[in-house]
Image: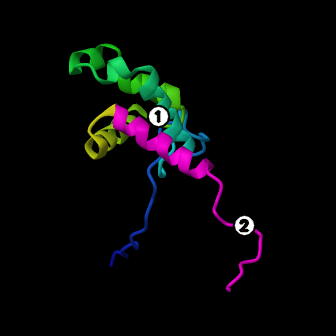
Amino acid sequence: METVKPWFYKPRKSRFGLDDGPKKGKRYNSLHWSPEENLKYVDFLKVYSDLVNGDTLQKRKYHLNRMLSKHIGSRSPVQCRSHHQKMMKAFQTPEAIIAHFYQQDDESAKPSSHTDEPVSYS
């Protein structure tokens, strides 16, 4: 009687070897957009507002998402396109996006109303 060998997992050998080290290529951030990335995004909108407001053919001609990705540095063109679409859906115009982010900066720069003086309850 023939014995049946138990099944076991045998990993496939890759043609590059098992220990090639880290993958080559640029690594992009996959978390939420940081405030620094958002400020770079807003700066890009200010500098290239004529392209951002242009038609689709103009955006494709100048590879707008690639330019934005290079400007930010830590995001892929696809992530930049998705973020821009989300912002445009929420604010409708690049000017509104810029105003929103600069309004947030102004509010954070204001001194708080808290003082160290004792409060009198007379």
Residue 117 visible within the image: yes
State if disc 1 and disc 2 touch (CB < 8 Å): no
55 on left or right of 98: left
Residue 97 on the magenta span: yes
Residue 56 falls in which quadrant of the image?
top left
Give the crowd class for mark 1: few <14, some 14-19, many >=20 residues within 10 Å: many
Task: Identify the image quadrant of the C terminus.
Answer: bottom right
Question: What residue is at 43 percent from the left and 64 percent from the top?
Answer: 9
Range of the magenta residues? 95-122
Q: Position of residue 18 (x, y in %)?
A: 56, 46
What number is the disc on residue 41?
1
Q: Is 61 in front, or is 20?
A: 61
Residue 108 on the magenta span: yes
Q: At numbered mark 2, what does the secondary structure look like: helix, strand or loop?
A: loop
Of all residues shown, which one is farthest toward the right? 117
14 on left or right of 7: right
Of all residues shown, which one is farthest toward the bottom? 122
Question: What residue is at 59 percent from the left and 39 percent from the top?
Answer: 20
Q: At numbered mark 1, what does the secondary structure look like: helix, strand or loop?
A: helix
Q: Nearer the viewer, mark 2 or mark 1?
A: 2
Residue 25 visible within the image: no
- Amino acid type at circle 1 is Tyr
21 on left or right of 39: right
Instruction: Calculate the distance from the C-alpha at mark 2 to the C-alpha at mark 1.
Output: 36 Å
Task: Identify the image quadrant of the N terminus.
Answer: bottom left
Q: Looking at the image, tell me whether mark 2 or mark 1 is earlier in sequence order.
A: 1
Which residue does the numbered mark 2 point to in the structure image? 115
